[in-house]
């Protein structure tokens, strides 16, 4: 891990940022997410970028980097980089509560990113767990300026028009997705370096790009580049490209009618109480109470009407989500 930066310098920057911001941000954190994870993970990512940028300055970079964080979410990475004196902006389709606590030095915009966006004033395009925007970021960067750089930390795999489908049978979905992104960046005339960050996540691989296209070659290459990237844009227009909604619907079976939820849980519980427990599941005091049996999810589905199943399915996850939400009653293996 950290093969693109000096580890000693990274450690020094990380501990400095942690001391300056860690406890304070965790204390004021207004979101429902876990601050211990998000605060210190973004401190690690900021430390990596700051180390990289300081190294490039030492190597004679002519101008300080500017950045746009696409799909910035809580905006914490933008706040940390801005606090260290770097000019940049975060863009997300939905504003978060913590945005109001950062202060005027942190520029965050509540707006959608579309295939037509061009931001030539920024030299770095950042995609930090940017989900469906991830493959679009190197494309938009390449179209905004010829010397643009890209930093991607991918998580959920998306292609240009939906979930990414694994293309390499001998790899995991994540490994295949990383290879897809590397090929995409190279097709856009970037050189690509793969690195692994020190963050509390199994998906910690990052992609760094350098533009290998000189300005003199830009006109000659433009048509072939258009041939590569125009396709996604045209398909996007044909399908009616629509950014993620600004307000996320709650879809975890908690918004359904209470009486419907209670009756469904009661139905499933009674059926499980009628099922026989296996010998391995029987308890020594089974004669004094009924712990119920074990049934496959597909058998429990048969208890519900088509209308009930559709109502559950509309809440993302269906019956399985309902059972998980009632883990104080049910024990499930998935």
Image (cartoon, helix red, strand yellow):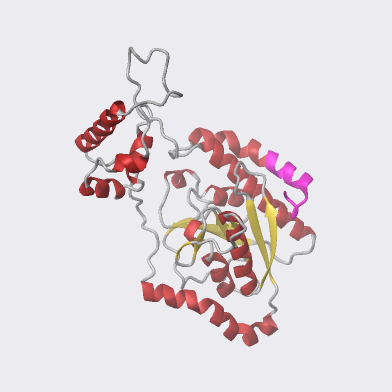
Q: Residue at x 71, y 55 (%)?
A: 52
Mark count: 0
Range of residues picked out in magenta:
1-15
Magenta stretch contains residue 276: no
**Residue that protrudes farthest toward the bottom in the picture:** 220
**16 relative to 127 in the view: left or right:** right
Q: Which of 64/148 is in front?
A: 148
Q: Which of 38/54 is in front?
A: 38
**201 relative to 61 in the view: left or right:** left
Q: Quadrant of residue 4?
A: bottom right
In percent of width and height, residue 274 lies at 28, 27
**300 relative to 220 in the view: left or right:** left
In percent of width and height, residue 319 lies at 32, 42
In percent of width and height, residue 172 lies at 59, 54
Q: Quadrant of residue 288?
A: top left
Q: Residue at x 42, y 72 (%)?
A: 236
Q: Quadrant of residue 286?
A: top left
Q: Which of 82/174 is in front?
A: 174
Determine if residue 92 is in view: yes
| Dominant secondary structure of the residues highlighted in magenta in the image | helix
Magenta stretch contains residue 10: yes
Q: Is residue 258 above or below residue 232?
A: above
Determine if residue 85 is in view: no
Q: For the C terminus, give its image quadrant.
A: top left
**267 relative to 110 in the view: left or right:** left
In percent of width and height, residue 164 lies at 50, 61
Q: Is residue 238 above or below residue 151?
A: below
Q: Is residue 26 above or below residue 236?
A: above
């Amino acid at each position: 891990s950290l093969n693109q930066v000096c580890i000693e310098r990274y450690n020094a920057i990380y501990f400095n940022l942690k001391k300056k911001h860690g406890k304070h941000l965790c204390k004021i954190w207004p979101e429902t997410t876990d601050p211990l994870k998000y605060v210190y993970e973004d401190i690690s990512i900021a430390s990596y970028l700051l180390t990289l940028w300081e190294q490039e300055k030492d190597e004679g970079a002519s101008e300080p980097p500017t950045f746009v964080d696409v799909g910035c979410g809580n905006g914490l990475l933008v706040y940390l980089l801005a606090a260290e004196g770097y000019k940049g902006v975060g863009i997300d389709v939905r504003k978060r509560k913590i945005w109001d606590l950062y202060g005027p030095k942190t520029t965050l915009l509540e707006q959608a990113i579309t295939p037509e966006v061009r931001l030539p004033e920024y030299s770095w395009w950042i995609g930090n767990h940017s989900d469906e925007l991830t493959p679009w970021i190197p494309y938009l960067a390449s179209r905004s300026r010829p010397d643009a750089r890209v930093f991607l930390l991918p998580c959920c795999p998306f292609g240009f028009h939906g979930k990414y489908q694994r293309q390499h049978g001998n790899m995991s979905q994540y490994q295949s997705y990383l290879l897809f992104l590397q090929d995409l960046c190279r097709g856009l005339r970037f050189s690509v370096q793969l690195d692994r960050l020190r963050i509390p996540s199994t998906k910690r691989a990052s992609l760094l790009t350098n533009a290998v296209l000189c300005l003199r070659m830009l006109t000659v290459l433009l048509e072939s580049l258009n041939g590569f990237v125009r396709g996604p844009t045209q398909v996007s227009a044909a399908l009616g490209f629509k950014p993620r909604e600004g307000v996320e619907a709650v879809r975890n079976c908690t918004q359904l009618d209470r009486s419907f939820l209670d009756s469904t849980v009661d139905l499933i519980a009674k059926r499980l109480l009628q099922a026989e427990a296996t010998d391995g599941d029987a308890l020594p005091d089974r004669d004094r109470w009924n712990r119920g049996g074990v049934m496959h999810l597909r058998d429990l589905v048969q208890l519900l009407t088509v209308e009930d199943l559709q109502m559950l399915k509309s809440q993302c996850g269906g019956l399985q989500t309902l059972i998980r939400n009632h883990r104080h009653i049910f024990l499930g293996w998935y």
